[in-house]
Image (cartoon, rainbow, N blue to C red):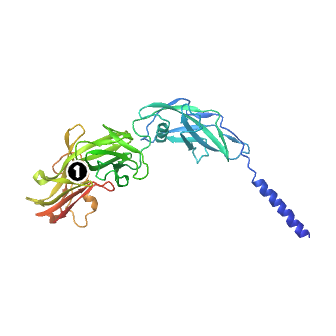
Amino acid sequence: MQKYLLLIACSIMMFSCKKDDYSLNTNIQPVAKLTAPLDNKYIKLQPTTSATVSFEWDQARAEDGSLVLYEVAFDKENGDFSNPVAKYASDGGGVQNKLTLSHKDLNSIAGKAGIASLATGKLKWTVLASKGYNIQKAAESKLIEVERPNGFAEIPTDVYLTGEATEAGAELGNALKMKSTAPGVYEIYTSLKNGKYHFTNRNTGTPTTYSISGTAVKEAGESEQTKGTKVYRIRLDFNNAAANVTEITSIGLWFAPLNKFLFEINYAGHSTWSAKGQPIEFKQESWGRDERYKFRIATVDADGNAGSEWIGSSNADNSRPTSSTPLSFWELRPIANNDQWNYCYKFAAEADNKNCDINLYFYTDKNYTHEVIVK
């Protein structure tokens, strides 16, 4: 009997302990003071740099001395934080009474608060302290004044070209993906025919759309091609909202030994230029046969000014390619000047006195490159 009484007593004690374990004191005192930055501090945002702003405040106090979590809430200048434009957990996963926020994030918050590019406006901020389900807003809020640069607060991860004027048509699922050449910068080599076109941040659902207005890229709207079918390089820089549309009138193969162009390479669609069955003959020199070549792109800018750009090898000098030459040999790289000899490729030995196909590929999913097919 004593054994059973002992078991009952232990059960009662365990139940009492479990009941105590599940009691939770969520009482906290809210943050009393925001300490940094100073009220109405002016910040010129530089979102393309590593610049940051530190938001700091006094600790909130839990009645039972346990851990308190923090979020910093941002709102419009006249907002009341009932529907803040953004909230961020503090450093250390919400534990520290400090938030280190990048200028890039602040630029995004400013955009959400309705502060336009190149404009100056104010953001209100405060701290939300929480323990369990109990969330307490700080006893005060402060303002920061931010000046936004030109450009987009939210830079798209991907950019697509679509519309009736494009090679892929107006079906969103067929939109042409642009090449990312630097953070926030995208380009594509393609043709446009008469009609409307625009850009999107994805090729499914209801994407954000962009258009070109003069030399600027802006959100929403449509661009229109009215000059007939032409080939272009389109570059969009979302960091400073800049657009550059360059017409490509021709690409020529420059044969260095003769100091002249051998032939033009025609646009074949889908970001490809092609010349079929072109005769290639090396130049006989006292030391051997010379086979060096590169390419020139003839351009017309938005103001109608003609120009040229050179593309060639990443190496100032090369050996003739063989079957073991790496694919990087044929990659197309911009060349700063029109020097006759430097940064030329070399034809393979078997191309001498043969007809060749020359294909240039400006595909957006890989490095730009070319190939020579000996017939």
| Number of marks in picture | 1
Q: Specify the quadrant that holds the C terminus.
A: bottom left
Quarter occupied by residue 362: bottom left
What residue lies at 37% left-to-right and 40% top-to-bottom? 221
- Please, is residue 323 above or below residue 270 in the view? below
Q: Is residue 306 visible?
A: yes
| Residue 371, percent from left and from top | 22, 60
> Observer-nearest residue: 118 or 271?
271
Q: Specify the quadrant that holds the N terminus.
A: bottom right
What residue lies at 75% left-to-right and 54% top-to-bottom? 22
Mark 1 neighbour class, 10 Å CA radius: few under 14, some 14 to 19, many 20 or more: many
Q: Residue furthest right?
A: 1
| Residue 98, percent from left and from top | 58, 41
Q: Residue furthest top?
A: 40
Query: From the viewer's perspective, is 210 left or right of 113?
Result: left
| Residue 223, percent from left and from top | 32, 42
Label 1 sits on residue = 311
| Residue 317, percent from left and from top | 21, 55
Q: Is residue 297 visible?
A: no
Q: Amino acid at mark 1?
A: Ile
What residue lies at 74% left-to-right and 45% top-to-bottom? 64
